[in-house]
Image (cartoon, grey):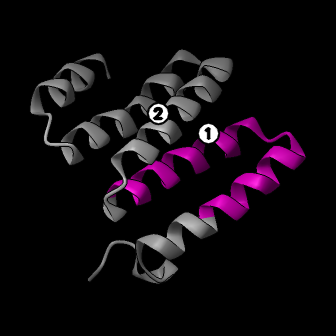
Amino acid sequence: RQPLARYGGADGAVETFGAVLTDCETDGNMLGRMLCLISMGCALVYRGDAAAARDAGRAAMAAGAELDVVLELSAMTVMAMAAVADGDATAAREIGGKV
């Protein structure tokens, strides 16, 4: 079973999370925004777009930092996944060690 099948694959998931992200930003829902950015980052990794996943991860970390350090560190997992997608095991281990 495909991990993102219920969204129509990675492209559909990125589109869905983008729409939800817009709603969260409009509503001022920082926690929802951070969680959506994490989910979008994961979908971007599945889609093979590591650079966009890193951008989503950085934005998720910034949103998490405004809420709690634990949430910021949770958001950092997207950065580790993007490093794996880029084939950079060293960076993935380094990031993973911080989480």
Say which mark, if any, is on residue 11. Answer: none
Counting labels gives 2
Say which mark, if any, is on residue 75. Answer: 2
Residue 8 location in percent, x, y?
Answer: 47, 83
Residue 37 location in percent, x, y?
Answer: 57, 45
Please identify the quarter of the rendering in which residue 53 is found: top left
- State the separation of the CA atoms marked 1 and 2: 8 Å
**Residue marked by disc 1:** 34
Q: Residues within 10 Å of mark 1 (few under 14, many from 20)?
A: many
Please identify the quarter of the rendering in which residue 65 is found: top right
Q: In this view, does 4 lie to the left or right of 66?
A: left
Q: Quadrant of the N terminus?
A: bottom left
Give the vertical position of 35 relative to 9 (above or below).
Answer: above
Q: Quadrant of the C terminus?
A: top left
Q: Give the range drawn in magenta.
A: 17-45
- Examine the structure image and report whether residue 16 is included in the region drawn in magenta: no
Mark 1, secondary structure of its residue: helix
Residue 69 location in percent, x, y?
Answer: 53, 16
